[in-house]
Amino acid sequence: NEAEFTIDEMRLPGLWPRVCAVDTDIGTFAALWAAYDRKADTVYVYDAIEQARGPLAIHAEAVTRRGRWIPTIFDPKARNTRDEGLATAMHLIELGIDVQTAEIDFTAAIDDIASRLATGRLKIFKTATQWVSSYRRLGRGEKGEIAKEADHLMRATALMIMRGIGIAITENHATELNEDYIEVGGRSEITGY
């Protein structure tokens, strides 16, 4: 029941580390942003996009607009050969995104998503409508394989849960790591961008 894991927007405490997870192929670019409440071991997905793949520079702008300081996790083998995926990761880095790569077993990770949803440890802002739509389309084929047509945001979610939590940082920590970091413009207290 979606009502159990979708929540109204709330102010995200600055002490909760943030992370972005990206999943892309030749036709689609998907990204989601999450905050992690370490004390409660709860992940809050506060934004998500899934759109037709265009030039990576356009997508990189969407990612950095939500916080250049937020690290991004990307699985280079999720959609392509490892070399193609690594080339995509390098291009994103060249475009100013702090990309770290990690590989996961998506099918196994789906169980982690289901467990977190069932135990209240994965919350989705109601404004992340594309994530909710992707979740509704998620299904399995006759052999138990995950349906490919709706899995971009789910793959990003799996990557974020399996590997992204480990690289998530707070803005203060990011600032300490990079003294040249300067954020320009006002930001929302809800989303942080």
Image (cartoon, rainbow, N blue to C red):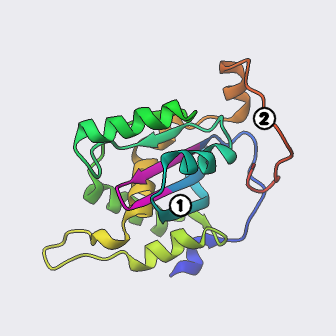
Q: Main secondary structure of the magenta part?
A: strand
Secondary structure, mark 2, is loop
Dividing the picture into quarters, in which one does residue 137 lie? bottom left
Looking at the rendered image, the disc whose residue lies closer to the viewer, 2 or 1, is 2
In the rendered image, the vertical position of residue 17 relative to residue 156, given as above or below = above
Residue 52 appears in the rendering: yes
Residue 13, x across and y down, in percent = 75, 47
Q: Which residue is mark 2?
A: 183
Dividing the picture into quarters, in which one does residue 148 lie? bottom left
Residue 132, x across and y down, in percent = 53, 74
Q: Residue at x 59, y 80 (%)?
A: 3
Q: CA distance from mark 2 to mark 1?
A: 28 Å
Residue 115 appears in the rendering: no
Question: Quick check: is 11 in the magenta stretch?
Answer: no
Q: Nearest the camera: 150 or 55?
A: 55
* Span highlighted in magenta in the image: 19-30
Tell me the crowding category of disc 1: few under 14, some 14 to 19, or many 20 or more residues within 10 angstroms, Cα based: many
Which mark identifies residue 27?
Answer: none
Secondary structure, mark 1, is strand
Q: Is residue 154 toward the left or the right of residue 108 in the image?
A: right
Q: Residue at x 61, y 68 (%)?
A: 128
In the rendered image, the vertical position of residue 59 relative to residue 167, given as above or below = below
- Disc on the earlier residue, 2 or 1: 1
Residue 10, x across and y down, in percent = 76, 61
Question: Quick check: is 25 in the magenta stretch?
Answer: yes
Q: Residue at x 48, y 66 (%)?
A: 117
Q: Nearest the camera: 15 or 80?
A: 80
Q: Which residue is mark 1?
A: 122
Amino acid at the residue labelled 1: Leu
Tell me the crowding category of disc 2: few under 14, some 14 to 19, or many 20 or more residues within 10 angstroms, Cα based: few
Outermost residue, left side:
143
Amino acid at the residue labelled 2: Glu
